[in-house]
Amino acid sequence: MKSVFLIFLLVLLSASVFSQQKQDVIYTKKGWIIRGEITSETLADSIKIQTRDGNLFVFYKDEVSKITREDAKKIKPDPAPYRTKGFFSATDIGFMTNNSENTGTALTLQTVNGWRFGRLLYLGLGLGFDLYEPDKILPVFASWRGDFNKKGRVHLFGYADYGYGENVTRNNDPNIISRGGRFVAAGGGIKFGTYTGNAFYFRVGHQSQKANTITSFGTSRNEKRQTFNRFAFRFGFTF
């Protein structure tokens, strides 16, 4: 059993060693360090080395202090430029906390598509689905978003939404009618940019959704008006 374990351990170690890529490294007397692949014989008067990006360097042997072969260093790609113009899309999922008037935690889904006119002016149209038990609301809204800083890969942003939430709750009783109402939301968040120019984000804000329920009893009618005021916490992806 011990021998099997030792063989398995040796296989793992050897796989780890051979999986590491090697590269030639030339150290010059002037302090340069050039990494790449040597393309000429080291016995010649000069040494040629080609770097990863295709540049070719030629050194005389008396200019070189030493030549080694080392593990290749992983080079992170340059991040994509910060975009302030053009189409954008943002989709997220989250939850909304309860308050004293409306009990229960509500699920929320949203997507916004629009156009970047500048760093502080993203305009778009949004569609969502908010699950307030027992009401199910489908908000359709106009959306503003803006980034407060433009340097780095982490950005603070704000948002504001205004529209109408359609109540899509199904009632088995034909005497009960569910209706939606005005939808308003505002808040802020933080985006974490990727090297492709896209970003993951987290945002938190407050939203207000009006709704009412109409119940008919013969010739009489009872209307219950309510407003869902919630703090919303959302996680999403934007490009």
Image: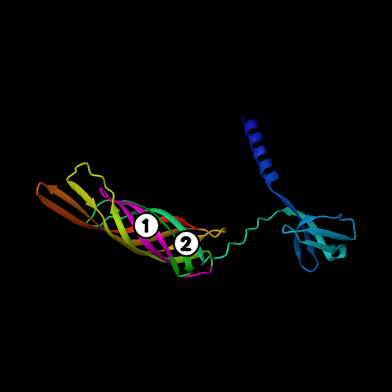
Q: Residue at x 69, y 48 (%)?
A: 20
Displayed quadrant of residue 143: bottom left
Q: Residue furthest left?
A: 219
Would you say residue 100 is visible in this rendering?
no
Image x and y of residue 186, in percent: 35, 64
Q: Is residue 14 above or below residue 2?
A: below
Instruction: Check disc 2 and report its element: helix, strand or loop.
Output: strand
Residue type at numbered disc 1: Phe
- Identify which residue, 130 or 232, lies in the foreground: 130
Dominant SS type (magenta): strand
**Among the two numbered marks 2 and 1 on one chain, the one whose residue lies closer to the N terminus:** 2
- Identify which residue, 18 or 58, lies in the foreground: 58
Q: Which residue is mark 1?
A: 233
The stretch drawn in magenta includes residue 204: no
- Identify which residue, 35 or 53, lies in the foreground: 53
Instruction: Indicate which disc residue 120 carries.
Output: none
Image x and y of residue 79, in percent: 59, 62
Displayed quadrant of residue 188: bottom left
Q: Residues within 10 Å of mark 1 (few under 14, many from 20)?
A: many
| Magenta stretch, residue numbers | 123-151
Q: Residue at x 65, y 31 (%)?
A: 3
Q: Residue at x 83, y 59 (%)?
A: 48
Instruction: Check disc 1 and report its element: helix, strand or loop.
Output: strand
Instruction: Indicate which disc residue 191 carries.
Output: 2
Residue type at numbered disc 2: Lys
Q: Residue at x 12, y 51 (%)?
A: 221
| For residue 120, side relative to residue 16 (left or right) | left
Q: Which quadrant is the N terminus positioned in?
A: top right
